[in-house]
Amino acid sequence: MNILSNLLTQPVQPARSKQKRRGVEIKSQREIEVMREAAKIVATVLKEISQIVKPGMTTADLDAHAEKRIRQMGATPSFKGYHGFPGSICSSINNEVVHGIPSAKKVIRAGDVLKVDTGAYYQGFHGDSCITIPVGEVTPEAARLIRVAEEALYKGIEQVKAGNYLLDLAGAIEDHVKANGFTVVEDFTGHGVGRNLHEEPSVFNFRTREMPNVKLRAGMTLAIEPILNAGSRHTRILSDRWTAVTVDNSLSAQFEHTVLVTETGYEILTDRSKV
């Protein structure tokens, strides 16, 4: 889940963690094992949603499925109630960039570009991931946008290992996106994830000197999540105070994984191919 930068370090479950946690956390082996389980739940739910979604369903249908399955697997939805967010998923369609609110009035149609983002809170830790689903047959431009967005995520992940820096993965993402004629949304970033849904550091998808270029260390857990627009990179927030849309009505796509930094590389904790 992306969220505005002023909320990045706010705990999603304040009652469960009374101490305010600061800085970049290095997870222990026990904590990593728990995070693997949280991430597996998220991966399972997103895989199921990608298999059941079809035209005529509503985003509320998908939200109900996600919440039911998260709870069946012994976790609670990370997003529901987070700063007042009402759903267990963010469901954003076409020009909606992030934070779309599930609704029984939002009908999914053939040709839609559907982003589904969800998180699970399991035994004190969160997993977080997002996929973009082409609903039925989409336009060639939409198909290419979705493909490049997923490729950009893996270009960034390939730069993850102890000793590398955030700018290494940010640059790899930005270069791939620009080479394919799309734009990187800069209003939202990825983040650390663990005991809190949003932790330090901010994981940006573009080169910048405005955020710390953190050196990666084994045991860090990062939510890496590039967002691509087919047109302008700029966004605006709708009156619901959550849904971000493209300013020029262009399509948007996003992919996200929770990733563990290791000494020699990375482990994708929310890998859907393993569930």
Image (cartoon, rainbow, N blue to C red):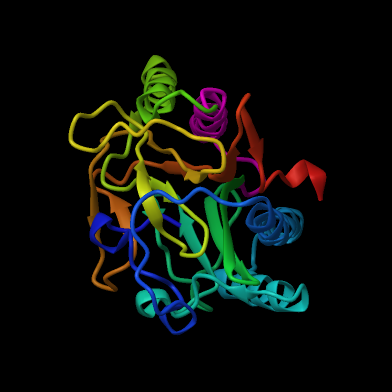
Is residue 209 shown above or below 80? above
On screen, residue 1 versus residue 186, left or right, reads right
As for residue 219 lying within the magenta part, the answer is no
**Image-quadrant location for residue 239:** bottom left
Residue drawn where x is 57% and y is 29% of the image: 154
Whole-percent x, y for residue 220 in the image: 51, 43
Is residue 18 shown above or below 159? below
Q: Which residues are magenta?
A: 134-160
Is residue 36 shown above or below 153? below
Residue drawn where x is 37% and y is 64% of the image: 21
Which of 251 and 49 lies nearest the eye of the viewer? 49
On screen, residue 132 versus residue 166, left or right, reads right
Magenta residues: mostly which secondary structure? helix
Whole-percent x, y for residue 147 in the image: 57, 30
Farthest residue, direction left: 210
Which of 102 and 275 lies nearest the eye of the viewer? 275
Which of 5 and 263 lies nearest the eye of the viewer? 263
Tell how many labels. Answer: 0
As for residue 156 lying within the magenta part, the answer is yes
